[in-house]
Amino acid sequence: MELVKLQEWVKAEGLKVCIVFEGRDGAGKGGVIKAITERVSPRVFRVVALPAPTEREKTQMYGQRYIRHLPAGGEVAIFDRSWYNRAGVERIMGFCTEEEARHFLEVAPTFEKMMVDSGIILIKYWLEVSQEEQTRRLEDRIDDGRKIWKLSPTDIESYNRWDDYTRARDEMFSASDTPWAPWYVARSDDKRRARLNIITHLLSRVPYKKVVHDKVKLPKRQTGKRYKSPDYPFKFIPETY
């Protein structure tokens, strides 16, 4: 209910909200995003989960492909991983050079300052999962045919690089945890508590009020007066259930 109130306020006031979710593989980013978006409009709450860059995008300025997904007035853009790929998986897996990663960390605060100065409400979350819980979740994906699509070759290869990811996380925080775009950390071993805690925190970061709408009353329906449907042979699906 409160997320719907937030949605209506964002629409009414033309707010621009950008939410970034980062964390290790299996930290629960997708589940949190699903919990946020399951009762709101996809026209307002847009989820951005970009695939690996194309050959053309690789030639562009880094971050360019993310910029076009930033929110306009009346929108909430939720990034399931973001420009911080360069500080994490790209750096650790060798998809960029160390120099490129360090340059990104130098310019990221300025980029985000420009976002905030333009009126975007930027909220960054890092989901912190323990080694034991990450192992349990990744093993669960292997054994569950419904979840195997969540397990990519990169996930497998990066699994044994816990310390590398920890170091990359710490350097990312040190460089980009700024007064205008701080990092908020959520413990995510308990999925339900993590989702509730993040939603509660999110609601506290975007000041909103209830938008009062005129009460809707359904009009009298016209049936069979202006048009009568022919006896068309509809191809109904089998009613298995």
Image: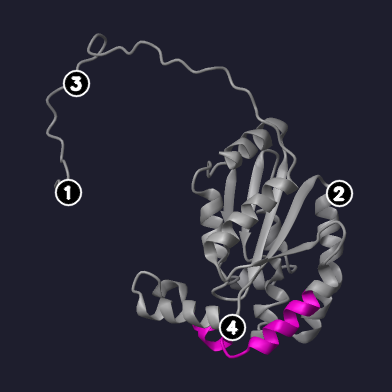
Residue at image mark 4: 131
Tell me, yes or no, if residue 94 can be seen here. no
What distance separates the C-alpha of mark 2 from that of mark 1? 54 Å
The secondary structure making up most of the magenta span is helix
The residue under label 4 is which amino acid type? Gln
Q: Residue at x 64, y 87 (%)?
A: 162
Marked residue nearer the N-terminal end (4 or 2): 2
Marked residue nearer the N-terminal end (4 or 1): 4
The residue under label 3 is which amino acid type? Ser
Residue 107, disc:
none
The residue under label 1 is which amino acid type? Tyr
Tell me, yes or no, if residue 46 can be seen here. yes
Residue at image mark 2: 117
What distance separates the C-alpha of mark 4 from that of mark 2? 38 Å
Marked residue nearer the N-terminal end (2 or 3): 2
Task: Pick the residue in front: 106 or 186.
Answer: 186
Marked residue nearer the N-terminal end (2 or 1): 2
Residue 169 part of the magenta segment = yes
Task: Pick the residue in front: 229 or 132.
Answer: 132
What distance separates the C-alpha of mark 3 from that of mark 1? 28 Å
Residue at image mark 1: 241
Region in magenta: 152-172
Residue at image mark 3: 229
